[in-house]
Image (tube, rainbow, N blue to C red):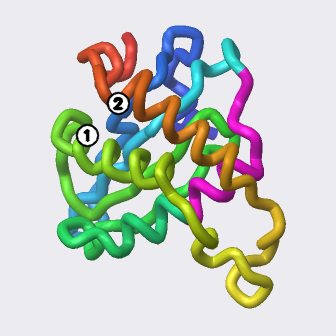
Amino acid sequence: MKKIASFTIDHTKLHRGVYVSRTDLAGTAVVTTFDLRMKEPNREPALAPEAAHAIEHIGATFLRNHPHYKDQVIYFGPMGCLTGFYLVLSTKCSSREILPLIQEVFQHVAAFDGDIPGASPVECGNYRFMDLNGARQEAARYSEEVLSAIQDENLVYPE
C-alpha cells in the first residue's frame, strides 16, 4: 500500500506548532486538515487521554458555535498518538491565517469552567473519561508556550 501523507513527515524533526497537514478537493469544495501539534513527538510525554477527551469536547463545541467558522468545521479531534489534534475545515487557508482561531480555541479551553459539554451518558460513550484540570493545563501550556509567540518553523512542516 502507498504510504499516507502524515507518515511522510519526519517526526524526529517535528516541533509543536500549527501545520497544514493536507489540502484536498471534496467535489468542488476545498478541505484543509490542520495538524495542531501540542507535544514534541517521541520527545515528551503524550497527552493524557482523559485530558485529550475533555479538550475534544470543549474545543469541538467552541468551534461548532464560532460566529465565523461554525459552518466550515468538519472535524476536530485528537490524533491517535495523542501528540495533538486535527482540525478539518471546508476552506483553504494557511497555518498563519488560521492561527487566530487556534489561539481562541485553546484560550477558551484553558479558561473553561463548568460542566464539560456533552459529558453525560446520553451524549457520550465514555462520559466519565474526562479530566478538565488536565485539559486546562495542557491548553494553557500550548497557548502560552507555542501559540502566543509562534515562529515560522512552527507553521511549516520540516523538510
* Crowd around label 2: few <14 · some 14–19 · many ≥20 (10 Å): many
Identify residue for label 1: 99
Q: Kindly state the secondary structure of the residue where label 1 is placed.
A: helix
Magenta stretch in the rendered image = 45-57
* Crowd around label 1: few <14 · some 14–19 · many ≥20 (10 Å): some
Q: As drawn, is 14 to the left or to the right of 127?
A: left
Query: Is 146 in front, or is 1?
Result: 146
Which quarter of the figure is the N terminus placed in?
Answer: top right
- Taking the view exactly as shown, the residue that stands out farthest to the bottom is 122
Is 53 one of the magenta-colored residues? yes
Write the residue at 67% across / 39% down.
Answer: 82
Identify residue for label 2: 147
Residue 133, horizontal then vertical, whole percent: 68, 48
The amino acid on which the numbered mark 1 sits, given as a three-letter code, is Leu
Between the C-alphas of marks 2 and 1, the distance is 8 Å
Q: Does the residue at mark 2 contact the one at mark 1 (Cβ under 8 Å)? A: yes
Sequence-wise, which precedes: disc 2 or disc 1? 1
Query: Is 89 in front, or is 49?
Result: 49
Write the residue at 43% across / 46% down.
Answer: 106
